[in-house]
């Protein structure tokens, strides 16, 4: 009856003449269009993601460079990547669970968005200055004080970035109708890769305008330090823009928009534990997580060993304090920017595939080819082709898994997205813990780790066959 009443209200509102039954479809379609968000609304909803992604790109491209500069041995580099995803596994499900039930004057997801961004900004100001903090001799596990300070800062940075990032995915689910979801996530994907471009290119640009790209042993160059400063400023400005421009729905509006009962909208109905929700998770949740394991383990190896691999194969140096090593670090930022461009191009191609499963599998195979080629290429310019292919799989990883999972879900979306984030964090923990051992097995060659990553992606492409694709009507 409520649905019929809304139709009659719409007819009266628009002064429509009486219509026959066969015109109901046209009326319902018009009602859907009447509730559509404008492009400006969708852009405002996602704009903060641009700043968050700049911070994430700076972290991905520069962390191994920073710790190598602080004196970390190549066999230790993967160790520094364990704590960040571990914290993500602990924090993300809780952010999803509690934001599902958070209704306050600031909104539902926005408090987490703002809190995560503020912590990220603070850490971005501290992390690149780790080399200036002298605690003297080596402390625990053979690491000096600067490396321990940097490790703790990295843990906080990755955690806060994830806390700030997750609400954007949830807000699109909350506030964008089914007929505009594709547009909403497309805008988010575009801003994600645009932010990556800016973050990756910052050190190169700052070096070009005259900032020092080298520094005394154990000190991070000014080009990297000021990249983090600029990234922190852009991050908070972008997040504040979304925070003040977007007004989230209250529980009543949310229930009406999603055709839910008031208890369901407030999160009080079926308030299950995380463990019980995991046991109720659809099969698609688990099969996509299996594919995710191989993908994210491969990318952890990429982030950990690219700087050392490129410095060795293209510059012929391994000394982190050398000019060649720091020049390779800047070039890695450019390669990651090329990767982002490849991802933006491939994001336009993915919808043209007959099925998402086919797009997923092909993307992983092409990405594996890109990883494999890095080992054999010794010309820095030819690496552009390799990283364009790597960008293809990155585009697929950003969009396709969430499409599979959200289409298979009916409720507790925020909580399930938080739990699904574990399929991103867990493989990174495994790859980070095993990285030193695997590096020793391949003869200590950081470039050889790209062969390992290629094999992981090929295994992931095989596992795509087990994913069941759901299509919402």
Image (cartoon, rainbow, N blue to C red):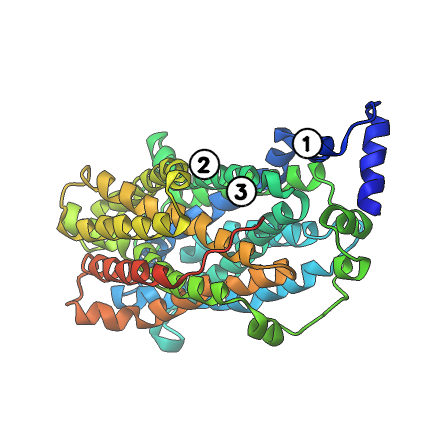
The local crowd at label 1, few if under 14, some if 14 to 19, many if 20 or more residues have their Cα within 10 Å, is few
Residue matched to label 3 = 185
Whole-Å distance between the Cαs marked 3 and 2? 14 Å
User: In the image, 446: left or right of 177?
Assistant: left
Most foreground residue, 328 or 125 = 328
Viewer can see residue 220: no
Return the disc, 3 or 2, that comes first in the chain's sequence: 3
Q: Nearer the viewer, mark 3 or mark 2?
A: 3
Q: Nearer the viewer, mark 1 or mark 3?
A: 1
Most foreground residue, 371 or 290 = 290
Return the disc, 1 or 2, that comes first in the chain's sequence: 1
Whole-Å distance between the Cαs marked 1 and 2? 29 Å
Q: Circle 3 sits in a helix, a strand or a loop, which is it? A: helix
Most foreground residue, 315 or 185 = 185
Figure check: 51 above or below 135 = above
Q: Circle 2 sits in a helix, a strand or a loop, which is it? A: helix
Name which residue lies at 46% across and 64% down: 423
Total marks shown come to 3
Q: Circle 1 sits in a helix, a strand or a loop, which is it? A: helix
Figure check: 153 above or below 325 = below
Percent across and percent down for residue 195 are 47, 39
Question: Are circles 1 and 2 on residues that touch, CB within 8 Å?
Answer: no
Return the disc, 1 or 3, that comes first in the chain's sequence: 1
The local crowd at label 2, few if under 14, some if 14 to 19, many if 20 or more residues have their Cα within 10 Å, is many
Residue matched to label 2 = 194
Whole-Å distance between the Cαs marked 1 and 3? 18 Å
The local crowd at label 3, few if under 14, some if 14 to 19, many if 20 or more residues have their Cα within 10 Å, is many
Percent across and percent down for residue 102 are 74, 58
For residue 33, which numbered disc appears in the image? 1
């Amino acid at each position: 009856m409520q649905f019929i009443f809304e139709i009659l209200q719409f007819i009266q509102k628009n002064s429509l003449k009486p219509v026959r039954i066969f015109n109901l479809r046209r009326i319902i379609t018009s009602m859907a269009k009447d509730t559509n968000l404008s492009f400006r609304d969708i852009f405002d909803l996602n704009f903060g993601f641009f700043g968050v992604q700049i911070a994430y790109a700076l972290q991905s491209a520069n962390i191994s460079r920073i710790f190598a500069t602080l004196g970390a041995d190549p066999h230790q580099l993967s160790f520094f990547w364990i704590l960040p995803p571990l914290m993500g596994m602990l924090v993300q499900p809780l952010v999803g669970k509690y934001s599902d039930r958070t209704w306050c004057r600031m909104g539902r997801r926005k408090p987490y968005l703002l809190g995560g961004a503020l912590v990220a900004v603070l850490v971005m100001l501290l992390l690149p200055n780790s080399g200036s903090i002298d605690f003297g001799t080596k402390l625990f596990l053979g690491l000096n004080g600067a490396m321990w300070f940097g490790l703790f800062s990295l843990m906080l940075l990755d955690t806060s970035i994830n806390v700030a990032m997750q609400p954007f995915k949830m807000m699109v689910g909350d506030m964008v109708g089914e007929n505009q979801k594709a547009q909403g996530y497309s805008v988010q994907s575009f801003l994600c890769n645009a932010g990556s471009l800016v973050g990756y290119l910052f050190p190169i640009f700052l070096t070009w305008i005259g900032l020092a790209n080298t520094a005394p042993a154990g000190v991070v160059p000014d080009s990297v330090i000021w990249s983090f400063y600029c990234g922190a400023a852009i991050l908070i400005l972008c997040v504040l823009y979304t925070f003040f421009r977007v007004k989230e729905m209250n529980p009543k509006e949310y229930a009406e928009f999603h055709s839910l009962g008031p208890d369901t909208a407030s999160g009080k109905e079926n308030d299950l534990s995380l463990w019980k929700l995991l046991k109720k998770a659809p099969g698609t949740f688990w099969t996509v997580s299996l594919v995710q394991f191989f993908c994210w383990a491969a990318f952890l190896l990429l982030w950990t060993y690219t700087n050392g691999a490129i410095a060795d194969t293209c510059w012929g140096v391994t000394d982190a304090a050398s000019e060649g090593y720091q020049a390779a670090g800047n070039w890695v930022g450019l390669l990651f920017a090329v990767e982002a461009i490849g991802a933006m191009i491939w994001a336009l191609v993915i919808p043209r595939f007959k099925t998402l499963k086919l797009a997923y599998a092909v993307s992983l195979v092409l990405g594996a080819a890109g990883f494999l080629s890095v080992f054999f290429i010794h010309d820095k310019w030819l690496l552009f082709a390799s990283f364009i292919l790597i960008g293809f799989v990155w585009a697929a990883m950003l969009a396709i898994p969430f499409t599979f999972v959200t289409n298979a879900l009916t409720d507790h979306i925020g909580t399930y997205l938080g739990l699904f984030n574990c399929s991103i964090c867990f493989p990174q923990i495994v790859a980070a813990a095993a990285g030193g051992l695997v590096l020793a097995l391949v003869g200590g060659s950081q470039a050889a780790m790209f062969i390992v990553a290629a094999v992981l992606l090929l295994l992931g492409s095989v596992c795509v066959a087990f994913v069941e694709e759901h299509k919402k009507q």
